[in-house]
Amino acid sequence: MRYQFVLPVPIPDSYLSYPINGQHFSVFMLMMIKKYFEDFELDHTRQTKGRTVTETDIVIHAGQSGDFFPHHMDEEWCKTQPFKKRIAHGTLIFTIAVGLTADVVNETAMTYGYERLRFIKPVFINDTIKVTVTIKEKKDHKKPGFGLVTELVEAHNQHGELVMVCEHILLANKKETNA
């Protein structure tokens, strides 16, 4: 099953776009799948497309989060600091990384949580982030009929440097309870 969404957003080349009343709109398809606990394969890896972090991203995130620390907002103050320029919020990079991995909706699994979140290197305005997701662990859940799948989520900048890492835990249905 596919759902279609139409949003006024910046248009990556990979998406179909068309004008409506002078504005360009992006059309993307959201794929619905059923991937059960048993279907996840250890060490399976997938890579996302890239996403460039903009000054607008940082300003909007500051407004939404209330984090207006000078590390993110004050270019002149940042020149006196070790990185010499503004850095993106760690929580913004986490949000972008998670969003990049959201390419399909799995009807038989959901996010159980995130663990071991670390920000390894700073991300600057105009850096481009890509994410690699690797299945690292599978184990039974205490509730019968479910299992936990641990994904290692690694975000890299355009230089291939690791900037963020975390574990994403999925709660997935097992097949035998749904047969």
Image: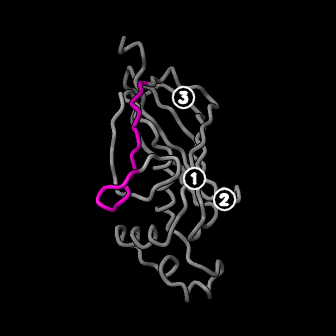
Residue indicated by mark 1: 50
- Neighbours of disc 1 within 10 Å: few (<14), some (14-19), many (20+): some
Identify the image quadrant of the C terminus: top left
Secondary structure of the residue carrying numbered label 3 = strand
Specify the farthest residue to the left. Answer: 21
Residue indicated by mark 3: 138
**Residue 37: percent from left, percent from top:** 47, 24
Mark 2 or mark 1, which is nearer the start of the sequence?
1
What is the C-alpha distance between the residues marked 1 and 2?
9 Å
In contact (CB < 8 Å): disc 1 and disc 3: no
Range of the magenta residues?
18-34
Asked if residue 61 lies in the magenta stretch, the reply is no
- Neighbours of disc 3 within 10 Å: few (<14), some (14-19), many (20+): some
Task: Say which amino acid is labelled 2.
Answer: Gln
Residue indicated by mark 2: 158
Specify the farthest residue to the top. Answer: 179
What is the C-alpha distance between the residues marked 1 and 3?
28 Å
Identify the image's colour scheme: rainbow, by chain, secondary structure or one colour. one colour
